[in-house]
Amino acid sequence: MTISQIQDEIINEFSLLDGDMEMTVFYIMELGQKLPVMDEADRIEENIVKGCQSKVWLTAKLNDGKIFFIGDSNTAITKGLVSLLIRIFSGQSPETILNADLYFMKKIGMERFIGTQRSNGFASMIKQMKIYALAFKTQLIEKS
């Protein structure tokens, strides 16, 4: 699936909640529970996303020209937010991630249910994923 298709799928899922704040927050936390467990060895200082109030760990691996992310957080809501980004970006090429236009946050009204601090942290997560994409893109260019 393309990044736009995945975002449209997320928008559709959130539209079923009809703007109900409590249900939306619960759904985000539920998404976080579905994340694969991150190895304890990856829960280290170098993998912490800077700029997040909660602790967020993020790793990435390049496999066959596609990036696969693994993430975790020490809070349920943040873990759910990480899971949304992983769903969107995992399995995409570095180039696709770098050029991605993320519009789902506005469409689902994310600013209504996450505060300024979490919004800043969310932006930091996106930035970190794009940094990984840039590093892998550079690596791929050097190999060719």
Image: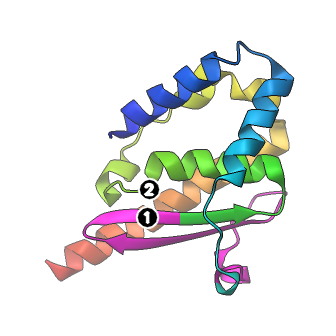
Give yes or no for contact between labels 2 and 1 (Cβ–Cβ under 8 Å): yes
Residue closest to the eye, 68 or 109: 68
Looking at the picture, which amino acid does disc 1 mark? Phe
Looking at the picture, which amino acid does disc 2 mark? Ser
Residue closest to the eye, 76 or 48: 76
Residue sitting at 63 percent across and 57 percent down?
35
Residue sitting at 79 percent across and 46 percent down?
77
Image quadrant containing the C terminus: bottom left
Residue sitting at 74 percent across and 28 percent down?
111
Percent coordinates x, y for residue 138 in the rendering: 31, 72
Residue at label 1? Answer: 68
Judged left or right of residue 3, residue 24 is right
Toward the top, the furthest residue is: 18
Helix, strand, or loop for circle 2?
loop
Is 10 drawn above or below residue 19 in the view shown? below
Give the residues drawn in magenta, as a range: 42-69
Magenta-colored stretch includes residue 54: yes
Residue at label 2? Answer: 90
Is 63 drawn above or below residue 97 in the view shown? below
